[in-house]
Amino acid sequence: MQELPELDIYRSLLAEKFAGAQISGIEVSSSKIFQASDEQMERDVIGKVLWFVERRGLHLLLHLDNGKRLLLHLGQGAYLYIGSESDLPSRSAQLKLVFGEVILYGVGLRANDLQLLSVKEVEEKLGKFGPDALDKRLTLERFVARFAKKRGAIKAALMDQNVISGIGAVYSDEICYSAAIRPDAKIPMFEQESWERLYAAVHKVLKEAIANGGGGEHAISAIEQAADFRPTAFQVYDREGQPCNNCGATIEKLDVSARKAYVCTSCQKDL
């Protein structure tokens, strides 16, 4: 699970560690993961400097000094680890991006999770997505307008990257809980006050998750491991059968638009 908070934390850590550093090598376990030829990697990646790291929705974008971009997607179970030749992640890595003695490992990567793109190609790929959930230009009015054509459940709409980007299965549940709205509530039934609560919950939940270290299940370095790394606890997500921290009622699991959703039906009564 890597959604907006976890990816934003990665962005910050990678920028702090690698911005201005030169890429001295790259190893990929399968050509399906990174479909760039050895010639392309030698010409456009190795020896290039990482200028800065950007998060675009559910993607990380590594800007290189030659104008190219490395677009990284972390799917279910995938994560990053900063180590070395002797300091390895707990699972086999599909990607090794080498910066001298320090190595950025990518674990759990799948087909096309890493791509080498031009600026134009990045926009062609990501430009279709909606605004970032924490985009300062996404006012309440613009937020509501993004859902104008939706008729289904709010959970599915929150996860639709064409509406707004950055929210997935986990934080859609957490946002609905914070807003006291059921994840299966149908959008046409929403009133202005419901939208206001939902909009506030998006900002509250995502910003608090970033501040608290996110909900990632894997430490990004040996330093975090030594510090007895623990992911952030959730209020409802994946807590079926457990008591609600607010009212003590039992958390339930629902089927919402062919997806699992977790809810406290006592706290989330609206709509």
Image: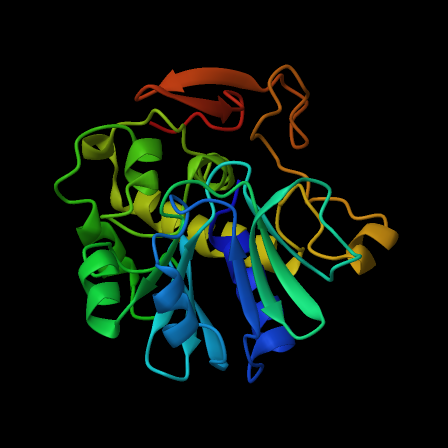
Q: Is residue 183 left or right of residue 268?
A: left
Measured from the top left, where is residue 111 in percent x and y? 38, 41
- Compared with residue 67, is residue 220 higher up or lower down, i.e. above or below? above
- Compared with residue 271, is residue 101 higher up or lower down, i.e. above or below? below
Quadrant, the C terminus: top left
Residue at point 65% right, 64% down? 103
Please state which of residues 113 and 37 is positioned toward the viewer in this rendering: 37
Measured from the top left, where is residue 259 in percent x and y? 38, 22
- Compared with residue 73, is residue 82 higher up or lower down, i.e. above or below? below
Give the residue at the far left of this rendering.
149
Give the residue at the far front of this rendering.
39
Please state which of residues 64 and 197 is positioned toward the viewer in this rendering: 64
Residue at point 25% right, 36% down? 190
Please state which of residues 226 and 213 is positioned toward the viewer in this rendering: 226
Is residue 216 visible in the rendered structure shown here?
yes
Residue at point 50% right, 17% down? 253
- Compared with residue 105, is residue 44 higher up or lower down, i.e. above or below? below
Measured from the top left, where is residue 123 in percent x and y? 22, 66
Please state which of residues 1 and 192 is positioned toward the viewer in this rendering: 1
Q: Quadrant of residue 155?
A: top left
Q: Quadrant of residue 237?
A: top right
Residue at point 36% right, 67% down? 39
